[in-house]
Image (cartoon, rainbow, N blue to C red):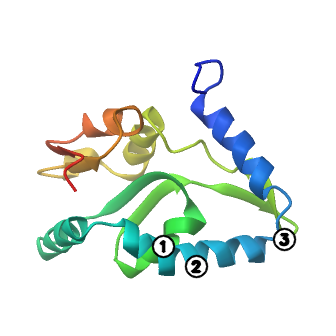
Amino acid sequence: YVTGIMKNEIAKEKVFQHFYGGMKESEFRLLAENFQKNILPGIIKESAMVRIAWHQSQQHDLCVVSASFEPMLNDWCKEQNMNLLCTKIEFAEGLVTGKFASHNCYGTEKVNRIKTAYDMQQYKTIYAYGDSKKGDGAMLKLADETFYRLL
């Protein structure tokens, strides 16, 4: 991927398969739960939580659009009353297969997911926050108000 020989999605899936392929689904979900409870709160900046609270006070629809895996963010997003569009992983017979059940939610795939999930014409103002030009650039172009590496 770094050398440009392999697409992001293929490289990410290969790495994911190497580390998690064959793991019990229950074990993976415990790792995800631990991440959401013990690690994620330390990663998310207080300024981001302030912005989330502001959007909620304005009764805006909120959606996290991330290349992260669904089990790693799903419960946290529900607790924050936010929707989630992200990379889905495949489970079969109680195991992590190591394959993705969706495209990697990265770059233009973020735009595809947003346009599938939302009728953009129904919103007066669209806000987008991102921290990666490659991963978030296309998504940021959808918004009326963009915030790059602000939070």
Q: Position of residue 133 (x, y in %)?
A: 34, 33
Q: Indicate which disc residue 39 carries.
A: 1
Residue lying at 38% horizontally and 43% vertically, measured from the top left: 115
* Gap between marks 2 and 1 measured at Cα: 7 Å
Residue lying at 13% horizontally and 71% vertically, measured from the top left: 54
* Gap between marks 3 and 2 measured at Cα: 19 Å
* Gap between marks 1 and 3 measured at Cα: 25 Å
Residue lying at 76% horizontally and 54% vertically, measured from the top left: 19
* Quadrant of the frame with the N terminus: top right
Q: Indicate which disc residue 18 carries.
A: none
Mark 2 crowd level (few <14, some 14–19, many ≥20, 10 Å Cα): few
The picture quadrant where one finds residue 111 is top left
Confirm whether residue 77 shows in the render.
no
* Residue 112 drawn above or below residue 53: above
Query: Would residue 142 appear left or right of 102 to someone viewing this image?
Result: left
Q: Earlier in the sequence, mark 2 or mark 1?
A: 2
Q: Position of residue 51 (x, y in %)?
A: 17, 66
* Quadrant of the frame with the C terminus: bottom left
Numbered disc 3: secondary structure: loop
**Amino acid type, residue under disc 3 in the picture:** Gly
* Residue 1 drawn above or below residue 65: above
**Amino acid type, residue under disc 1 in the picture:** Ile
Judging by the rendered image, the residue that carries numbered circle 2 is 34
Judging by the rendered image, the residue that carries numbered circle 3 is 94
Q: Are marks 2 and 1 in contact (CB under 8 Å)?
A: yes
Q: Earlier in the sequence, mark 1 or mark 3?
A: 1
Q: Earlier in the sequence, mark 3 or mark 2?
A: 2
* Residue 120 drawn above or below residue 38: above
* Residue 116 drawn above or below residue 2: below
Query: Would residue 52 appear left or right of 118 to someone viewing this image?
Result: left
Q: Position of residue 49 (x, y in %)?
A: 24, 71
Foreground mark, 3 or 2, reads 2
